[in-house]
Image (cartoon, rainbow, N blue to C red):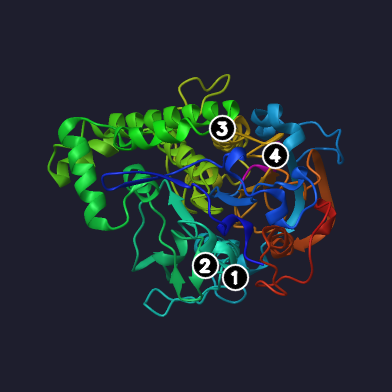
Amino acid sequence: MSNPWQLPRRKFLRGLGTVMALPLFESLLPPARLLGATTAAAKTFPTRMAFIYIPNGANMDYWTPQTTGPNFELPYTLQPLAAFKKDITVISSLDNNNANELGDGGGGHARASASYLTGIHPRKTNGADIKAGISVDQIAADRIGDQTKLPSLELSCDHGQRAGSCDSGYSCAYQFNISWKSDSMPMNPEVDPRQAFERLFGGADDAATKEARAKRQLYNKSVVDFVLDDANQLGRSLGGSDQRKLDEYISAVRDLERRIESSEKFTINLPPEQRQLKMLSDYNFEDHARLMMDIMVLAFQTDATRISTFILGHDGSNRPYPKATAQGYESGISEGHHDLSHHNNNPEKKTKLAIINRYHMTQYAYFLEKMKSVKEGDGTLLDNSMVLYGGGLSDGNHHTPENLPMVLAGRGGGAIAAGQHIHLGELTPITNLYRSMLDVMGAPTEKIGDSNGKLDVAFTKA
């Protein structure tokens, strides 16, 4: 039987050079009889999977809950997730062993990134002969990516070099990528919100997309204006709840586009070299991160893709965080993140590192709030997703990849027993978790990287 999500249904709004994917309307889902089900309750929504990467490890003293089970208390770093405590699973003792030296000397940041989703120790080279492994997201994309407009979506807040040496003899390709289509082909993430937006809402070909964008700019039009007639026609055929969903979606797209335009308006008419300097001086990390997160939400909401990765910061990033404030640190953190991660147990540096960790967690909470606000049947987009947040190192001071900082949000369509802290008791390959996640995605694999089993303890059905 063909996949039910490939059955004929209205999936797009169309206009001049514009194709806007639609949310998943219940009134347009295939009838239960076409799904091989006996009741209408069998209508389901697809499961989505996302990986949000943080750099430079964490201050684990402020991260790890003191107790396990459902009654755990949120420590300082996790407190921004208070509203989502029943939606998250904190997992302790996950290991990224292939980020260790294993005889290769320095380069912990490059190894952390390259091994994080692959479970493979990368070849130490700063030339073109890079080699890592196929990442978990691309294993899923290879199996189910043909069911959506985009097989996967890769995003980042950091422009990175694509060649040359970045970390102790390791190629920059390792340090600025976590997604790998093959062992020698990283999936370079999109950093520009505008380009990511156009990937979602562009036309059938590049020429039509560029023409439509030029006309929008010329006439000060939104992408929504190009598909409004089609949207109005569709709205007349929808039920009341789906009409409201369509209106909310149209408003969300229009708002996102306006925010992207606002972020561009002071630089768009400058020469390239001046534009880059202006963007650096006016750069707002929080605005950038949240634009990218909103794009991810829309991509999942419209079933444009079911798989995404997002690098909040590349491993080794030395970005300061003037908006990362706390009592006694009202002016934010002016020191570089990487410098603080090498704290040598200096108490003040460790405190500042924890403040940055919490600030990053606040961005994650923003994403979860957006996901939870999208209704799907009796649940939400978050209920039908798995969003893993964490990084390839725990202690950045020694580049330690053991006991990784990990939070898994969502219920994977009912497959995850959320709302608890799980301490595994012994170091367990993080790739075991990936195998269980791939099962939920309908893309099972017998082996990924250094996996030696599955992490069924976090799942109700794996």
Residue at which label 2 appears: 106
Q: CA distance from mark 4 to mark 3?
A: 23 Å
Residue at which label 3 appears: 370
Q: Could you tell me if the residues under marks 3 and 1 are in contact, i.e. CB atoms within 8 Å?
A: no
- Residue placed at 72% from the left, 62% from the top? 439
Q: CA distance from mark 3 to mark 1?
A: 39 Å
Label 4 or label 1, whichever lies nearer to me, is: 4
Q: Most prominent secondary structure in the magenta stretch?
A: helix
Q: Residues within 10 Å of mark 1 (few under 14, many from 20)?
A: some
Residue at which label 4 appears: 63
Label 2 or label 4, whichever lies nearer to me, is: 4
Residue type, mark 2 in image: Gly
The residue range painted magenta reads 58-62
Image quadrant where one finds the N terminus? bottom right
Image quadrant where one finds the C terminus? bottom right
Residue type, mark 4 in image: Trp
- Residue placed at 58% from the left, 19% from the top? 327
